Amino acid sequence: MTAPDPLGTNERYLHFARPDWAALRASTPLTLEQADLDELRGINERIDLDEVAAVYLPLTRLLNLYVAATQNLHKASAAFLGTLAPKVPYVIGVAGSVAVGKSTFARILQALLARWPDHPKVDLVTTDGFLHPNHVLEERGIMNRKGFPESYDTRRLLQFLREVKSGAAEVSAPVYSHVVYDIVDGEEVTVRQPDILILEGLNVLQVGGTGDAANPEFVSDYFDFSIYIDAEESDIEAFYVQRFLTLCETVFQNPDSFFQHYAHLTRDEAIETARFIWREINGKNLRENIAPTKGRAGLLLRKGPDHRVTDVSLRRL
């Protein structure tokens, strides 16, 4: 259980080198095949079944135990109150920078958790849907700060989580399109009392709350567990540049793409553009708003330059 201490807080976290963490898989079966992984994998991420076995299976084993314990706690509380135990989803928050691999991580985690018999219904919602529409961002003069805390409709996100945690039969969230770079009018994703809800986004561990100053409300108040995906900023920038190059050859070629004007950049122009965007927007957001929240996570996964997890830190109970 020896690994670098990325936070300098050994007393708050247990730190595991990759082999030690992988050993905690115990007898958890690998329920994904390569074809499943190919569908779940994001752009330029070279995740393989070995990564799933070494990193994800121990995590799903831990989460399965945590979910069961929380369900038993709800039953105990209901027995004490003389009521029926409500169907309340177990909520997992997934945070980290742009391009660090949050979306792929969340999709694989969803697929694996759904294969456990005790919680077959696992939903995934991204906070992109809670961004203010472009016209609102333009009116407020913050279009170039999309992804920063002020670009989100935090009140609506909190209302969504409040209803989910209250056991509402159906709760809807807006849908965001990365092609048109905006909220899709009239389109929603509906959550219907899942066993587990994964909420993935840049700023889900932010400490900026809403409500009155004496009683602020935070997104993370509704989490049962939270995960932060970390890497050296230089590595994340490299991930971003490589993803941008791939998007120039694929998604940006779509006539409907908001970024179609990047489609015909030369490779050198694309690299220069990506680095400029990273320097002025995504890197700044990481340093100012995202990275400072990592110490609030229940689990930290640290990646190396090849996107593979090198070590894991688990917050002590």
Image (spheres, rainbow, N blue to C red):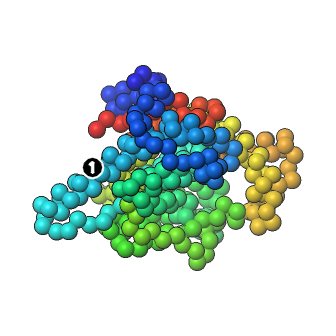
Left or right: 113, with 266 as reference point: left
Q: Nearer the viewer, residue 15 or 257?
A: 15
- Residue 315, percent from left and from top: 35, 36
Quarter of the picture containing the N terminus is top left
Kindly identify the amino acid type of the residue bearing the numbered disc 1. Ala
Rendered view: 151 above or below 96: below
Quarter of the picture containing the C terminus is top left
Left or right: 2, with 46 as reference point: left
- Residue 112, percent from left and from top: 48, 50
Number of other residues with Cα within 10 Å of mark 1, as a class: few under 14, some 14 to 19, many 20 or more: few
Q: Nearer the viewer, residue 200 or 205?
A: 200
Secondary structure under badge 1? helix
Q: Quadrant of residue 300?
A: top left
User: Which residue is situated farthest in the bottom direction here?
Assistant: 186
Residue indicated by mark 1? 69
- Residue 305, percent from left and from top: 63, 31
Q: Nearer the viewer, residue 242 or 158?
A: 242
User: Which residue is pictured at 45% across the width and 24% down the height?
Assistant: 3
